Each structure stands twice: as C-alpha cells, then as structure tokens.
Amino acid sequence: MAKNLGGAVIALLEHDRVDLRAAATTVLAAVGKDDEAVEKGLIGRLTDADPVVRRLALEALVDHGATGIASHLVAILKRDDEALAERAAQVLATQGAVAEGALRKELGHGPVGARRAIAQLLVKRTTVSAIDALLDQLGDPELGEQVLQLVRHELDAGDDKLAELVWKAASGRVGDSGKRLDKELARVEKEHAKGAAPAKKPKKDAAPAPFDPTRDAAVAPILAEHTALLRLLGYLARPQSQGLLVAQSQEGRPRPVRFAAIAALRRIVAASEAKGTEAAIEALIEYADGDDLGIAQTAIDTLKGARIPERLAKAFAALAKSKNPAAQKLAMERLPAGGGAGAVKALIDALGGDDVTARDAAARGLAKAPEAVLPLTRALLAATDEQVARRYAGALRGHRGHVSAAALDELAAAAQEHLERHSKGKADADSILLERILTELIADLAPAKHVELLFEYARRLRKAGKPGEAFAALKPLLRSRADLDAAIDDESRFFLAVLGLKAAGNAILRASHADDPVLAQFGRLAGSGFPVAKKLAKDKDVEDEEIYGLGFRLLESSDGNDQELGAELLAGIVEDRPRSKLAKAAKNKLKLTGHLDE
C-alpha cells in the first residue's frame, strides 16, 4: 500500500470518532497483513473503548496470523467484555505452546472468572509445566476448588496422558505439602500454648471458639493444597496410593485431612480389580463405628461401594450392632457373604425391633441373604407379636421359590398345630392371627402344601360336627382354582363339594347360580366319571333335601353333563323313596325337563 495512504489509515485508528476507527480497522484487516505498524496499531485497538472496534481488531489479527499476541489475549480474558473474552479464549486454544507461557504467568492473578478460563485452557495442554501451574493454585481460596474440579472432569473423561502427568505431579507434591502442613500446625500450636493473642477478637459476651489450628491464616492455604492433592489421588484411583491415604486418614491427623483421605479411598476400594485393600477396609470399618460422627459418615459412604474382603466379612457384619445407626444400616443392607450366623441374627433382631430405619435396612439385607431363610423361619415361629410376625413373613416371601424343604416343613408343622388347636376351640385371638399369617405365607411359598393343610383341618372340623366351619376353611381355595386343581384328587374334590352342599343346605335352591363353584365341583367330578350319585347316596351326613336341591339346580344348567347328573340324583330319590313328598317333587321336575316319560 502506498506509504502515505497507509500511514493515514493507521492514524485513523486513534481518531476520536468510533466510525472512523472501525472503518480504519476494517481496511487494515483487508490490506495490512505482514505490516508491523499495522499489527501494532491493531493490538492497540484491543483495548478500544468501543466493543465493535475491539472485536474487529481481534479478528483482523487472527486473519493476519499475528504471533506474539498471547499476553494481549490473556489480558482480554480479564476484562468485562465477555463475548470478546470468549473469542480470545478460542484463539488462545489454537496457539498451543506459543500461548502457554503467557497463560501460566497470568493464572495466579486477576479476576477469578478470567483465571478459571485460563485454567480451562491449561488443562487441555497436558504438559508438565501446565499441570504444575494448575496444581500451584490448589491452595488458592478462590480458584483451588475450581482447578481441582476441572482436572477431575478431564480425568473422568478418560484422558490417560493427563492422568499420568497428574499422578506424577500429585504424588510428588503430597509428601512436601504434608510436611509443610505439619510444620505450620506445630508452629501455631506452640504459639497458642504460649498464650498468643487470637487472630480475631471474639464478640462481646460470646463464648470463645475452641482452638482450631487449621483456621490459622498461614495454615489454611497449605491445608487446602494438601487435601486437594489427596482428593486428586483419589480421583486417579491407583492402588499405589492406598498406604499414603490410610496413613493420612488415621486419628491424630487434622480432621479436614482425614475427611479428604477417607473420601479419596472411595474409588480405590470400589474398583473390581482392587487388591490388597484389607488395611484400608479395616480402617474404614473402625472409623464407621467411631465416636466422630462426621468421620464415621464419610467412612460409611466410602464403604458403601467397597468390595469387602472375606477376611473382614465378620468385622463388617459386626457393624450391624454398632452404636451408630448409619453404620448399622450399611451392614444390614449389605450383609456380606461370610458374615455368619451372628450377622443374620443381628439383622433378624433389627427387623423385629422398634427402629423403623433399622427395620427397613434389615429387610433389604435379609432379602439378599439366602442363608437367612431357616433362621427367619424359626424367628417367625417364635414370634408372639402379630406385626413382628408379619415382618418376618414378608422377609421370607422375598425368598419365594428358594425356601428350603426343612423351612417349609417347620412352617407346616407349626401351622398344623395352630389349626388343630383352633379346631378344638382352644385358640385365642392372638393364636388365630398367627395361624392366619402362617397359612397365608405357606399359600405363597408352597400352594400344594397349603391345600393339604387346609384339607386336614377341614376333615378334623367335619369330624367334630362342624361342616359349616370346615367349608369356610376350604372356601378360599375355590378362588384359586389352578392351585386347587393341581393339589387334590377326586376324593378330596368330592369332600369339598359335599361340604359346600352341606353349607348351602336348602338354600341351594334359591341362592345358587349356574356358575356356582360348588356346583362346578360336582359337574367336574361327574364329567370325569366319578360316581357322584352313588357316593352321595351312601354319605350319612347328606340329607335327601340337599340331594334334591343339588339335582334341581344341575337340571337347570345348560351343560349336558350337569343335566345328566341332576337327573340321576332326582331319579335316585324317586327310586329309593317313591312315596315321599320329595320323590313326588323330583318326579315333577324330571317330567318338566324331559328326563322322565309319562
């Protein structure tokens, strides 16, 4: 470009009028590439009072491929122009090593928003110097936590190169930060022992706060750095750091350090390939049952996802009796294999107890423990409280399909004892409730055994002259026909049908319907060739009126087999007692239905 013209245009960059500065910037963007004077002028416009001019100048420099402007771009990050700062960050991200030095230099200064943007750029660099610069900020009260979370995000995304760099840097620094922390704590404690004045004067009439050396102004940043490094080691989840983390979690270390170290163990003890975690798990179990409830809760949270080694299964299960309810809940919910009879008993006791939270946790733990079935069964049989018995029964239902024959036999024997006492009129209200719980449970776990029990009970009741109660005991089975059909033979079905007939009595003529389940039992028996009429005629307990009512209703059925049986029953009455009033009524019914010729 002509020298005079170029100089004139560059001069316009300093003009008072915004439109002329913008126009000059636009012209120079188009024709001023590789001109040092133009580049210098455009860099000057990066701080222009007008945002449009600033943006035009930045885009011009980008188009020209200007180098050596990283420090100017970093300065933009620290200003209030968010849109321009975002664009500057994009440009810096493309400049790689050229920009890294300026970024590292400015990371420790300026507004926290700009420093965060710089940290975001540096974490993507994955160089030793960039990682060192980032870790240098971990003790900063404004930026430290943000840097930690930025690094964590990248680690969780699977950046292996970054993970290796962070591991080397953090594992190398943590020992030094620990020493510096101990040194400062010793100094503060020594000064306190000498009676040094507190850093802050307490408010009037306020009780003095307990001495806490970690709140000292000189200690705080070192403590923040040290705990952040421990947490970084936890994010990396490398087994090599277990020893260090366990040591830092021990009683006697500053409480924030213990919190960080225990939490840092979380990923390590949860890893499927983790080996040699016994020392860590053992320490965590001890902390979970400790007096410091904050430390205990952190240990519990870490143990939730831990793989409990077999050697420590009993120690872990012992937490079910901890004085800490949260530790109890954890042990009950997880019930490790190998916890033994003691662990199962603790869960059963908790399920039968008054603490609702402990009961819920115990129920979840017992549901995952097949070895609890027989102890649960025996606890249920020993229970005298209805609600406790129902809880045990509910826990056993969770093992439906896997309840042992031994447990089922014990349940059936107890239910039979209750039913026998009931049939003799010796059962009180509590016994009847427990009987119901047992029989309902057996119905869920072993339907065939339940049917067998009820039939035995009904036979005893009938023998005792209580056919109505006997039918009432069996009547629920008529609603679950699949279980009934699979569990009984024709003789038992006839027994049930007769009880139903006896319970209905003369009312069968009025109340029965075509789909009456009692009529259905007789119809099914007749259809299979069972000699229903002959068996009824021989049954001393069945009255002629009951046979007549049954025959009458069957004749009104639309089913041919039912009609045939009904006709046979009424014909038997006519044949056996031809002069009786009942025989005359039977003959009339047979004539009306076309089953008897005139």
Image (cartoon, rainbow, N blue to C red):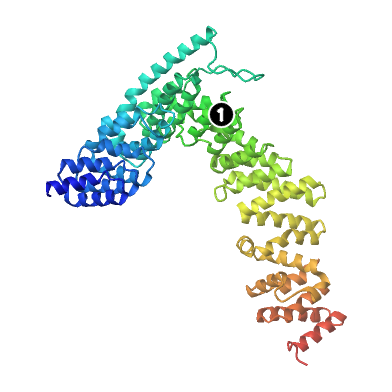
Residue drawn at 53 percent across, 18 percent down: 212
The answer to whether 172 is drawn above or below residue 187 in the figure is below
Farthest-out residue, bottom: 598
Farthest-out residue, left: 2
Farthest-out residue, top: 194
Is residue 309 among what the camera can see?
no
Q: In the image, is 170 to the left or to the right of 585?
A: left
Q: Quadrant of the C terminus?
A: bottom right
Give the x, y percent position of residue 282: 47, 25
Give the x, y percent position of residue 28: 20, 49
Is residue 72 among what the camera can see?
yes
Give the x, y percent position of residue 381: 68, 41
> In the rendered structure, which amino acid carries the disc numbered 1?
Ala
Give the x, y percent position of residue 409: 63, 46
Q: Quadrant of residue 551?
A: bottom right
Q: Which residue is mark 1?
A: 318
Q: In the image, is 115 to the left or to the right of 576?
A: left
Circle 1: is it few (<14), some (14-19), or many (20+) Cα within 10 Å?
many
The answer to whether 337 is drawn above or below residue 416 in the figure is above
Q: In the image, is 437 to the left or to the right of 342?
A: right
Nearest the viewer among 24 and 206 is: 24
Residue drawn at 72 percent across, 60 percent down: 474
Nearest the viewer among 418 and 476 is: 476
Nearest the viewer among 33 and 317 is: 33
Element type at mark 1: helix
Q: In the image, is 181 to the left or to the right of 61?
A: right
Number of marks in the image? 1
The answer to whether 5 is drawn above or below residue 153 in the figure is below
